[in-house]
Amino acid sequence: MFSWVAMQANVHQSSLKSLSMLHACTLLHRNNAIIEKPFTLLLLLLFGVCSTKHVTHPIFPDVDFVFHDDYDPLGWRLTKPDFLQLPRSNPNESAPVLMFYMRKSDSAAFNDPFYSWDCLQCQLWVSYSYDGGLVWKTPFCFLDLPTGYLDPTKGWWGRDGPRVSLQQFNGVSSLHIGISKRTTDQTTALALFHFSTNGSLPDGRHPRNRNIFPSPQVVMSENVGTLPHTPIVVNNGSRLLFPIHYSARSSTSPPYGLCNVIVFYSDDFGITWSQATPELVVPSPHGGDGANEPAVIELLNGTLWMLMRTSQPVLYESFSLDYGSTWSTPSPTRFASYSSPPELMRLRARDDPGILLIWNNGLISDGDDAFGRSRQVIHGAVSYDEGSTWHGFRELYRDPYMDVPYEYGHDSGTAYATGKEMENGNVVASAGQGALRQTVFVFDPRWLTETTQHTSINDVVIFNDTTNYNGSYFTSYGVEGVSRILDPTNSSHYVIQFDARSFFHALPTVIYNFPGLKRGQMVLTLYAASDDFSASIKIVDFFSPPNTAVEDELTVFAFEILSDCRSSSSQGLCISAREWDEVWLNWDTDVGVCNATSNGRHEEFQIRSLKFVVQPSYLRLQVLSGFMHLREIAVRSSERRDNVFEW
């Protein structure tokens, strides 16, 4: 068995471990067999009745889950929240974090809990936290949304909730809240509410000085989609931006799809608005939604950077050099994402300012359900050099019902993240769509900079072929022949068994997420339990479900391992049958080579030139014949070029 002399927990993990996880009196995971009544528990939590329960999360030990929702088709009244970190007003008190969400004030149920939510009588509610987002206080109604605004027969479109921004300029603070409002059956207007705080912000204890403008400001009366995008404050607080998308065409047909992205800006706290030029258009050669759901951040040099969802397998980007008045022609990035929106946020609480990106780093190329399956995991990456290099590519949250067949036309999965950095440097975020999928979680973004990970199957809490969550960093739903068993060679240890001896509709496969590394080293401890054993190892830079084929041309590198060294091909490795062996991988994406070693045999594989990030972060381990055991995986950076590693 290998050992790393330098293997130790990153210093930042200790701070994460001290963040106790708050659940709504329970974990909402079916495989934990603790379900109870999550919707009731969530309401109790939001109304300050539920007591705190501190639990170590078995799946993502570096992410603290606060609560999950329950889409109750007969009475669910809450939307996805957005968050706001208020500035510290008292040096002896922590600054509160506000959570805004919409709530139905009428008792009528909505008809489609998975997709739409139209509310004629709606309220904007606020809860707040003084302990970094772990405990939320009794909420209060912040605003009754006007029923007579635009078409009084159409409701407020609350599926994705409000989007909130705080503007501070020349000693004046202004709170901006964007919410969509139905105007017809097919179109939506975007209403922006302004609150002048008169120097005192509502923090839950003093909900006063809420001087709303006489009526909501209409930013655009055409169809702006269903998501009000977060207002962005730029140029030292003097300008407010609202990036949105709208239906520019009547169909999703090529060459541009349905939508364009446009940006509105205001230099008078949102009272009057101008439209930036040009409208942003992205090619959609196969049709689809086109350019939509943008996210914008201001770089430290004043440049504005926009990422946008497209119908292509990557996010697109655009830049503005004049604080949003004009924008460059969109161009493709190397962030893989299939028709899913990004979220960008600035990290400022610590000495080293950074950028956090939360997005679905997923790619599915086959079938009508590709849209839903590409959103089964949401990821995080962080940059501390204004986007030149990125760290992380880690799973923040997996769809707890990813094995439920995707229903075409209904949003589900982990997409549509919202989040804010808090005073202590941690991030509070929300993600998820569809029944029982929405969650709020807290994490330390410094975790994304870690470059070492060691996973022993002994430490995997849950692993079998029927549960959705298959232990820390593992996914194996939708396949057969994968199970966690006692090591046949050592009954004090557990292993993952891959059994392909019988016919299965999907070969036994495990997906393993590790820190994204341009130069990295991985060691797998394997046991070929049969003479006819063969397996496939693929290293990729995006998520794809275990039961979905990933073509070799989309992998960073791929090869086979066999238990019969005599028949091993020139493009593969061999391990001894019925003996524990180690497979060592050492890759450098800049050089374009991966060196692999096992059982005294060395092979060199060329790394393919991909259009994605080419920062490997996923292992796909699949047994093709026979059966095999996996005992542990270790990954670390190999930035040192001397190839001296201590094991």
Image (spheres, helix red, strand yellow):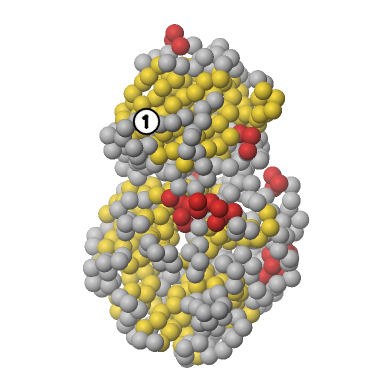
Q: Quadrant of residue 351?
A: bottom left
Residue drawn at 32 percent across, 77 percent down: 236
Q: Position of residue 237 (x, y in %)?
A: 35, 79
To which residue does mark 1 refer? 644
Residue type at tag 1: Val
Determine whether 156 is above or below 493 in the image: below
Q: Position of residue 448 (x, y in %)?
A: 45, 51
Residue drawn at 73 percent across, 53 percent down: 35
Determine whether 383 is above or below 295 in the image: above
Any part of residue 598 in sight = yes
Any part of residue 257 in sight = no
Q: Nearer the viewer, residue 569 or 451?
A: 451
Q: Position of residue 339 (x, y in %)?
A: 42, 52
Determine whether 505 is above or below 518 in the image: above
Residue drawn at 32 percent across, 57 percent down: 385
Q: Nearer the viewer, residue 52 or 7?
A: 7
Disc 1, SS: loop
Determine whether 415 is above or below 247 in the image: above
